[in-house]
Image: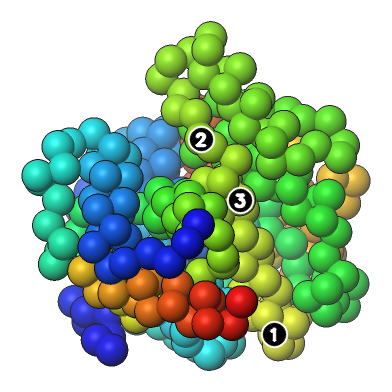
Amino acid sequence: MGVVTAAQARDWLIEKIAHRLDVATSAISTDQFFDEFGLDSTEGLLLAGELEAWLGFEINATAFWYHPTIAELAQYLAEECDNHAAQA
Amino acid sequence: MRRRREVRRTPTRRLSVAGPGPGNHTVCVVHPGALPSEVYRNLAAALEPGAGLTVCDLGLLPDYGEAAPVGPRDVVGVPELARQVVAELEPERRRPSWTLLGWSFGGLVAYEIASQLPRERQPDRVVLLDSIAPTIRSRHPDDSLDQAQLFAWFSMYLGARRGCELRLPAGATIVDLAAELARVSAADPTVRTETPMGLTGLYRGYVNGVLRNVRFVDAYRPARATFPLVVVTAERSLRPGDATLGWHHLALAGIEVRTCPGDHYTMITRPDAALMIARLSQPDLQSVRMSVSP
């Protein structure tokens, strides 16, 4: 996976969360806390695994704690992508 | 960087409330998360009429649910967790009769709760469900964890989450697990499949949860029990071949050992296991009558 923008990460998260919840993507708010979506910890970890596979690198276990919305996490992931690309 | 919001769900759920009168007792379960607390509804239904069931989910206590390496918090210790659960269970502890259960890591906290309480406030029975005692042989560095054993436990956990049994041969991988889940799903569409990538993330979280528990256990120095213990192992226990799961080292006041149907996870979901555990949770009725006679 190349460099990912915040917008791309946001769209990916919206699609995947909507799929897990079996709702339309339009029902997913990017400013809603993850634990308000009704995803329990198991679903969250499954999502994290798929996210890492998409990004091509491992995400810190505390990322979801410190960036608890789609908008914030997407921004963080874009920054991490930049960091990884710079180190490559 | 914004912190996770501070509004939290309450750790304690009262699945059923004991009826009035001294003959009705409450069963309090110390639950370490991993499965939703609704899994105890079968146990609630199996209790005798008038009994209540309260579940305290450690996963919703920040000092456990967010402890490293699962989350960013430092490990506070089993005695501190026990104190927090004692505060949560204050209404139940005021009843003339109550039983304390702990499943898996919750059993250690339940044991510590009973150890902390003065004799007159201790529960009528302390029942540990497939909990491994924090004895010397349990202490080990993180890197000595048996990966094959961890993966077998994980497969058991995933099966319980998906409502099916997943049995894999020794040496199976995440890809094999995903394939087995897909095979089961093909026969039962209610079982959801997962990608190997998703399962990799879940497995890492599972291992982090185990490591968190290891850190709590390794720092815990329990006193020997001044109260009788009831130890229930699952037919497919986390530690097969150890009838008391190490608790005989601590059971100064006696130990009763039973085995119930299911594996480590399904022992708290299966109706037949719930019936057995409900019977074992009943207090000594003779003791209750003696305590209330004029």
Where does residue B230 sit, x and y in percent of width and height?
A: 67, 55
Q: Mark 1 is on which residue type? A: Tyr
Colour pattern of the rendering: rainbow
Q: Label 2 crowding class (10 Å Cα cut-off): few <14, some 14-19, many 20+? A: some
Q: Label 3 crowding class (10 Å Cα cut-off): few <14, some 14-19, many 20+? A: many
- Residue B148 shows up from this direction: yes
* Left or right of residue B23, residue B225 in this image: right
Where does residue B27 sit, x and y in percent of width and height?
A: 42, 54
Please tell me which residue is depicted at 29% across the width and 58% down the height of the picture: A8
Please tell me which residue is depicted at 52% across the width and 46% down the height of the picture: B198
For the residue pair B201 and B36, the one nearer the viewer reads as B201
Same subunit, labels 3 and 2: the answer reads yes
For the residue pair B197 and A3, the one nearer the viewer reads as A3
Q: Nearer the viewer, mark 3 or mark 1?
A: 3
Please tell me which residue is depicted at 38% across the width and 79% down the height of the picture: A79
Residue that carries the numbered disc 1 in the rendered image: B220
Chain bearing tag 3 is B
Residue that carries the numbered disc 3 in the rendered image: B200
Q: Quadrant of the C terminus of chain B?
A: bottom left
Where does residue A4 sit, x and y in percent of width and height?
A: 38, 64
Q: Are marks 3 and 1 in contact (CB under 8 Å)?
A: no
Residue B225 vertical placement versus B267 (above, below): below
* Left or right of residue B75, residue A5 in this image: left
Residue that carries the numbered disc 2 in the rendered image: B194
Chain bearing tag 2 is B
Please tell me which residue is depicted at 10% across the width and 45% down the height of the picture: A27
Q: Mark 3 is on which residue type? A: Thr
